[in-house]
Image (tube, rainbow, N blue to C red):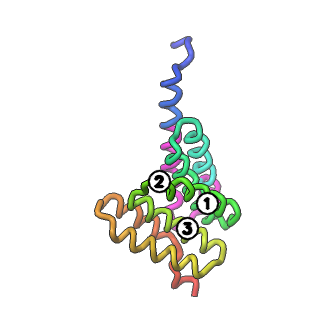
Amino acid sequence: MRDDKPTAEETALWRRRLAGQANNRAWTLAEKAGRTPAEREEMLDAAHAAMFFWRMVGSDRQRAHAELLLAHVYAFAGEVVPATRYLGRARLVLEASETAPWERALVHAVAANVAFAAGDARLHAEHHQAAAHAVAALTDAEDRAILQATLDVLPSPEQRS
């Protein structure tokens, strides 16, 4: 048994692992159709856990991605105020620097989800269409599949009618 405290590097490594695990769990639940109330709570908890750990060990971009995840799960929960706040904060970082095509697709998908939760049909349709076009244009098959899974659980503009 080890009596000494973990090094700063060991602690940071564990925090990164926990952030990644919480992030992945929240996204898995976000991509699930028909979540139970317990899964909805777990999704929110996991997204907050990811944010908690990324604040300790993450870059500005990692924290922005965690805020995007929080916006997404709050939108699914029908909590428009925190969803809008987290989306705005994430966009400040992600749109202020070089954004990868998959990140642009993700921002539009989450923005569509937040707009749907807010009842803004015009903005929902605009972002949903932009996300669909951005996903279709992705050249990396893995990125396209991941983003398509996100799009697949979003309400489409046609569902609003």
The answer to if 117 sits in the magenta stretch is no
Q: Amino acid at mark 2?
A: Ser
Dot 3 alpha-carbon crowd within 10 angstroms: few under 14, some 14 to 19, many 20 or more: many
Name the outermost residue toward the front: 96
Q: Secondary structure at mark 1?
A: helix
Front tag of 2 and 3: 2
How far apart in space, not on screen, are marks 2 and 3 (Cα)?
18 Å
Front tag of 3 and 1: 1
Residues at marks 3 and 1 touching, judged by CB atoms closer than 8 Å = no
Judged left or right of residue 140, residue 4 is right
Instruction: List the residue tagged with mark 1.
Output: 88
**Which quarter of the picture shows residue 89?**
bottom right
Judged left or right of residue 35, residue 136 is left
Dominant secondary structure, magenta: helix
Residue at the spot x=52%, y=41% of the render?
19
Residue at the spot x=51%, y=71% of the render?
154
Front tag of 2 and 1: 2
Disc on res. 120: none
How far apart in space, not on screen, are marks 3 and 1 (Cα)?
9 Å
Instruction: List the residue tagged with mark 2.
Output: 97
Give the residues in magenta.
Answer: 17-42
Instruction: List the residue tagged with mark 3.
Output: 111
Q: Amino acid at mark 3?
A: Ala
